[in-house]
Amino acid sequence: MAERNLVAQITVSRKPDADTEKKIMEFIKSRGCSDAEYVIDPNILGGIVIQIGNEIYDGSLRSRLEKIRRAL
Amino acid sequence: MFGYSTETMILSGISDLFEKLNISWVSIVLHLFNLVVLTVALYLLLFRPVKKMIRQRQENIRKIEKDNAELSEEVTRLKNSTEEVLAEAKKEAASIHENAVKVAERKADDILADAKRKAKDLVERTETEMTQERAKLATEIEKQIAEVSVSVAEKVIGKEITAQEDKKLIEESLKEWSVEKNG
């Protein structure tokens, strides 16, 4: 996929290590992004939330817990 | 029968006898006349009134007996009529009583059935309300348990998740999303 010069917003609870950052970059590039902007938010508890334009990939622990809450 | 001479002889004999007894024909005739007068007087003054009185009394008695018989008959008829009326009245009273009892029983049954139905409705409504309330309460409790559980989980996870676990979570998510895209 061609890069669309999009900047992905990456929300994590703590700054990831270089290896993880590399994997994140690979992923967002595969979604057409050229760069990433990190936001540290402890409220997501863990995991990652990636926003590319209007698309949101939510892999945070908070969202998982929210799913469990709804299921319960 | 007797010849003229015989009759004359008898009469002559009677005249002789009267003479011996010093009884004259005139005296006999007068006595006879007195007897007749007395008899007629007795008949007119005593026998006829007495007979008349007896006849009247007999008639009165017959009349009284007749009246008695009629009265007795009337009494019997009235008695029978009264008994019939009484029997009819008793029958009617029994019928009215029976009907009244039936109506009362039917009314009592209706009231009882209505009360039972109302009680049943009330019990059913109460049970339904209780079931709904229980379900609502259970849902509320479950919701609160879920809220509390998740809150507790959030606090525990937020404090205890390590960098390594976080990395693993991130990589799992990336892998999952990549597979989705390629799949």
Image: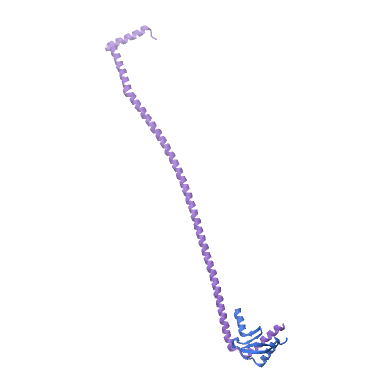
Q: How many marks?
A: 0
For this orientation, the residue located farthest to the right is: A1
| Depth check, front residue: B174 or B74 | B174
Q: Residue at x 31, y 18 (%)?
A: B37
Question: On the rendered image, what quadrant is the C terminus of chain A found in?
Answer: bottom right
Q: Residue at x 62, y 83 (%)?
A: A63
| Depth check, front residue: B177 or B148 | B177
**Which quadrant would residue B134 be assigned to in this image?**
bottom right
Residue B140 point in image, percent of width and height: 55, 76
Q: Residue at x 48, y 50 (%)?
A: B96
For this orientation, the residue located farthest to the front is: A5
**Which quadrant would residue B32 be assigned to in this image?**
top left
For this orientation, the residue located farthest to the left is: B22
- The answer to whether B70 appears left or right of B39 in the picture is right
Q: Residue at x 54, y 70 (%)?
A: B129
Color theme of the render: by chain
Q: Which chain is purple?
A: B
Residue B31 point in image, percent of width and height: 29, 16
- The answer to whether B81 appears left or right of A65 in the picture is left
Residue B42 point in image, percent of width and height: 31, 22
Instruction: Judge whether B112 appears above or below B149 on screen.
Output: above
Instruction: Judge whether B143 appears above or below A16 on screen.
Output: above
Residue A50 point in image, percent of width and height: 65, 86
Give the drawing colour for chain A: blue
Question: On the rendered image, what quadrant is the N terminus of chain A found in?
Answer: bottom right
For this orientation, the residue located farthest to the top is: B5
